[in-house]
Image (cartoon, helix red, strand yellow):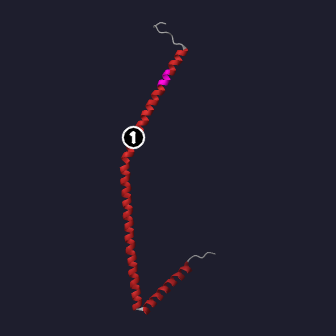
Amino acid sequence: MIDGKAPLSPSNLVDRSLVAADQAIRSTQRIANEALDDIAGTAHDLRERAAPVVERAAGCASAVVHDGMDAVRERSSQLSDAAHRVADGTRSRVREEPVRSLLIAAAAGAVVMALLASMARTSPRKQ
């Protein structure tokens, strides 16, 4: 006992080590809890900030889809009208010139048959 302190006994040393370890564990838990609280707060802030952006993006995507559908409907209507005009024109031509229409149809049929026969002769045959 040189400096006035009692020498540390092994049980006293273990007790002090246990107290120090317990304090270190509590300090680590406190720091970890604070870090988790900070992370949770940051995640909440990000969610709050992202919600309007996501809503705007969804609105824009919906508008683009809606505009695309409208364009498809309009183009479909235009094509249908054009098909009806062609059909009406064909009917009126057939009424005005039935013999000529019959000859044109027969010629077109002959051309199609000749093309099919030509394709059948030139295609490789499987054996």
Image location (x, y in percent) of residue 78:
37, 74
Residue plotted at (39% across, 87% down): 92
Q: Is residue 115 rendered to the left or right of residue 45? A: right
Question: Seen in the image, is 70 located left or right of residue 109?
Answer: left
> Over which residues does the magenta segment extend?
19-23
Q: Nearer the viewer, residue 87 or 55?
A: 55
Foreground of the two, 28 or 117:
28
Q: Residue drawn at (50%, 18%), measured in percent from left and top?
A: 16
Residue lying at 39% horizontally and 84% vertically, measured from the top left: 88
| Nearer to the camera, 50 or 97 | 50
The amino acid type of the residue labelled 1 equals Thr
Query: Does the segment drawn in magenta span residue 22?
Result: yes
Residue at screen point 38% across, 81% down: 85
Label 1 crowd (10 A; few <14 / some 14-19 / many >=20) = few
Image position of 18 with respect to 93: above or below: above
Find disc 1 in the rendering and name its residue. Answer: 42
Q: Quadrant of the C terminus?
A: bottom right
By secondary structure, the bulk of the magenta-drawn segment is best described as: helix
Q: Tally the marks.
A: 1
For residue 9, above or below residue 122: above
x and y, in percent, of residue 126 in the image = 61, 75
Instruction: Name the spot of residue 10 as percent of width and height, x first.
Output: 55, 15
Image quarter for residue 80? bottom left
Using the image as rendered, state which of residue 27 and residue 83 is in the foreground.
Answer: 27
Residue lying farthest bottom? Answer: 99
State the SS at label 1: helix
